[in-house]
Image (cartoon, rainbow, N blue to C red):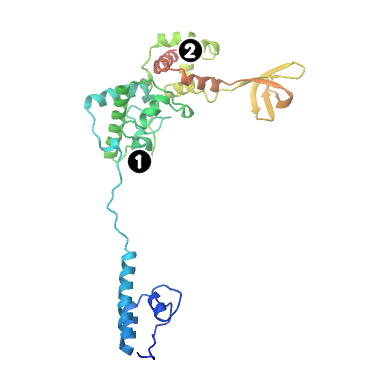
Amino acid sequence: MDKGFHCAVPQGPKPASFAVLNGMAEAVPYPKPIFHMALDIMFRRRSLYGIVALLLLSVFAAAQTTNHKTPKSTSTKPRSSGEGKSYSASLVQQGAALFRQDCSFCHGRDAAGGESGPDLTRSKLVSADVNGNKIAPVIRNGRPDNKMPAFDRTEQQIASLVAFIHTQQKAAQAQGGRRGNGGRKGVSPEDLQTGNADAGKKYFEGTGGCAGCHSPTGDLAGIASRFKGLELEEQMLYPRHAKSKVVVTLASGQEISGTLAYLDEFTVGLTNSGGVYQSWRTRDVRYKLDAPVEAHVDLFSKYTDDDVHNLMAYLQTLK
């Protein structure tokens, strides 16, 4: 054995295999010029140790190369069930008629968006839908927070709506999108004239309870001239600009009423008939709030689709 053997390693971190040969306990990162180092060792001393070092370095280099290879991904992005599925022409036509009756006033006749409803051809929910598993719950339950009422529809009707929506989305994608800037098309008043005005009047005066708060010769007189199409529909379903009324009862029993001007957990304020603002601490008074918006939202769970269309048809006669 050559007791004078030593490894001449270039300056820098020592490779793990050389750390072992030199009796060192720590392993350090492997430097790039591995074969140059091995050849340097072997040809300097031409010893068995140099050959062993070369073999060890070769094995280690192969292991390093294998461990750091990143396999190429051959997987493709999964597509939704509706994206590539074809539907019968009769099913799509049935869905188109139903969609234009129930949904076009918000989402447009072609499902590409209206003034208030989103473009369903670009909808992430529609893209993720598989055989109606995403769309059907929205149809049945509605989205009250987005002013969308629920619709009572059969399985067949929902299947036709799903077919129509997916077909419209597929057509829009084939065209590269209908509106590159993401805008929405307007909804024509004709899209909203699908109800029966006489039935709407009967609902207004009877089961709908509308006459308890509104009058066709009072606050609603000429409403169809002030608001048209979707604007009128929005006022009917969700009058967000309607002002709330409040009645405040003082400790003495005196009642003061007016238009609600401010309300939180500490303070209630109103503007009286003379235009004067008054406020009180909520712990010192009692108050009763009449909020038209909340009353209309409460109706979402009671409306049928026929109620909405008929009521809209009646309001369109109040010019």
Task: Tell me: 74 left or right of 259.
Answer: left
Residue on which the image places disc 1: 180
Q: CA distance from mark 1 to mark 2?
A: 42 Å
Amino acid at dot 2 = Gly
> Where does residue 11 sit, x and y in percent of width and height?
43, 82
Amino acid at dot 1 = Gly
Q: Is residue 207 above or below residue 268?
A: above
Circles 1 and 2: CB atoms closer than 8 Å: no
Q: Residue furthest front?
A: 1
Element assignment for label 2:
loop
> Where does residue 174 sit, x and y in percent of width and height?
26, 39
Element assignment for label 1:
loop
> Where does residue 156 sit, x and y in percent of width and height?
29, 22
Q: Is residue 248 above or below residue 113?
A: above
**Residue 40 visible (yes or no):** no
Task: Tell me: 232 left or right of 34.
Answer: right
**Residue 108 visible (yes or no):** yes
> Where does residue 164 sit, x and y in percent of width and height?
29, 28
Q: Looking at this view, is 149 or 216 the one in front?
A: 149
Q: Looking at this view, is 33 or 242 the one in front?
A: 33
Task: Tell me: 191 left or right of 171.
Answer: right
- Circle 1 crowding by C-alpha within 10 Å: few under 14, some 14–19, many from 20: few
The quarter of the displayed image where residue 85 is located: top left
- Quadrant for the N terminus, please: bottom left
Tag 2 or tag 1, which sits nearer the N-term?
1
Q: Is residue 164 above or below residue 196?
A: below
Q: Residue furthest right?
A: 252
Which residue is found at the position 36% from the left and 91% from the top?
2
The quarter of the displayed image where residue 314 is located: top left
Residue on which the image places disc 2: 208
